[in-house]
Amino acid sequence: MRNSAETIKKNSRKCRNRTTEIQAAWIRESSFTAPEVSLTQHTYLRSLRNRQYRITAAQVLIFVVFLVLWETAVRLGWIDGFIFSSPSRVAKTFCEMWRDGSIFRHVGITLAETLVSFGCVVLLGTGAAVLLWYNTELSEILEPYLVVLNSLPKSALAPLLIVWLGANMKSIIVAGMSVAIFGSILNLYTGFREMDPDKIKLIYTLQGTKRDVLTKVILPGTVPLLISVMKVNIGLCLVGVVIGEFIGARQGLGYLIIYGSQVFKLDWVILSIVILCVIAMLLYGALNLVEKKCLRGKER
Amino acid sequence: MRPLLELINVCYAYHSRGGETCALQDISFQVQQGEFIAVVGPSGCGKSTLLSLISGLLSPESGSISYNGDFAVDNTASEGSALREKIGYMLQKDHLFEWRTVYRNVTLGLEIQHRLDEESQARIDKMLRDYGLERFRDARPSELSGGMRQRAALIRTLALGPELLLLDEPFSALDFQTRLAVCDDVSAILHREKKTALLVTHDLSEAVSMADRIIILTKRPASIRKILELKFEQEGLSPLARRSTKEFQEYFNLLWEEMNDNEE
């Protein structure tokens, strides 16, 4: 009985202490920034910020723990470093390849092929979607073919492309495109079709033509869709390019992975995978920036 | 006096795989220069179809629509499009494009018709000033209130200098209070610009408060049930002022009875 009473007292004191702490911080901070922010709003903002810190900290922690565990496991002989590689071996390989310059060649080739095939997908995909939109009969004719080609595993096409186009950059770029193009045509075309019919009617009431509908409503109205489709596609292009490089390349990260696994240089394989992760992240991040810029331009 | 717009025995039907839906049957009426006509009828009776026909977006299956004595039957014919330039069409929603500024929205029609020159720009500037939108010239449509958006849509229509305005329930997307205010605004603007207007609405009180004549349509397939001429003791009243006159109540009741007979 006495005990519990004491605990309550202690707790309430703790609470009070905590409150005064927050209040003090509030007074301190508010005198510098925005004095009109209320105490509850301040507490709320603070809890938001704390939550963000916790999330970031956990993300970093997972990465660090993973690296440390991997390295320790190899060092203590739990797993074989020859097969599983290790962070330090990967780092060492990276430094070596940096010094002899071969890493730049491989990364550069893969990156260039991905960007070229992505550019082609953007142009051809938008162009084809516009064409289908212009001619609904054509779109009805082609629809089953597009659906089949879209659901076909594109890796099945890669060997064929190599035979037809030769083991060169051209066929790898086409392999990259083949993964992304059909999906983007279908997505964009669907987006074009879903445009509010009254917005289209508006253009006609202003005596516009179908061309005006395209340039004044459809294209500017589907910019957000275009960007989100492209965000997916840049990753798909990378997938296609790596598949292409598996089969018919003398350089590039896909080549490095296949070659490394064949000669048991697993450090190369792991390094390539790590670099692919970084590339995918950077490409996605770049498109995110573009999206933010476009949308901000719109809100202004 | 030659009517500005004349419809003679106009019929129209929609075709789909499921069959034929007759929307309009034997519609004939005239609109004189400077008149404000309201068209009322049960929902789905083909009121909007009527406007699409007059504006040339659709062509009548039979009958004729003549504008100032010229026949405008086919919207694809080039002479048809010359006639269409004299007709402005305001849709139910404002459909201001969020990716354009208010100014670029109101100049959309001029841009499409390649008529955006100094003279038309000066006219637009004046309208923006007159209708209290000058401050929002470079704003995005989402920053405007409902009433302002509707005014911007009206400027977009008026920018092309139409002689006849077709209004397809232009206030139905607004809340009641805004609606009364915008209704007054638009009516004042149309009177000032001396425009002829044809308003489609399902709101009977709106029709009585704005129109000189009311065309009552029957259920689908719509034909003309009655044309009601409105005479107010005091002329030139604003829609809001009309609502408090005793004639308003009488006309409203008359219209209400007509419409309810219609249901049977």
Image: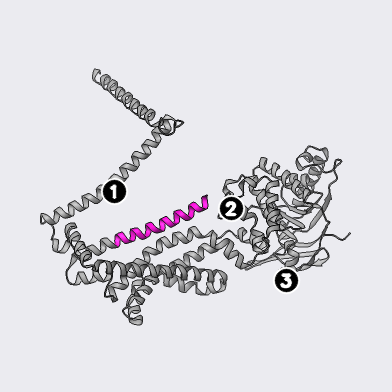
Which mark identifies residue B101?
A: 2
Contact (Cβ within 8 Å) of mark 3 with mark 2? no
Answer yes or no: are tags 1 and 2 on the same subunit.
Answer: no
Most common SS among magenta residues: helix
How far apart are labels 3 and 1 at the CA level? Answer: 66 Å
Q: Nearer the viewer, mark 1 or mark 2?
A: 2
Mark 3 is on which residue type?
Ser
Chain letter for mark 1, please: A
Where does label 1 land, which residue? A59
Where does label 3 land, which residue? B78
B81 or B15: nearer the eye? Answer: B81
Is residue B53 visible in this depiction of the protein? yes
In this rendering, position of residue A66 left or right of residue B246: left
Residue at 33% of width from left, 67% of height from top? A111
Residue A181's quadrant in the figure? bottom left
Q: Circle 3: is it few (<14), some (14-19), or many (20+) Cα within 10 Å?
A: few
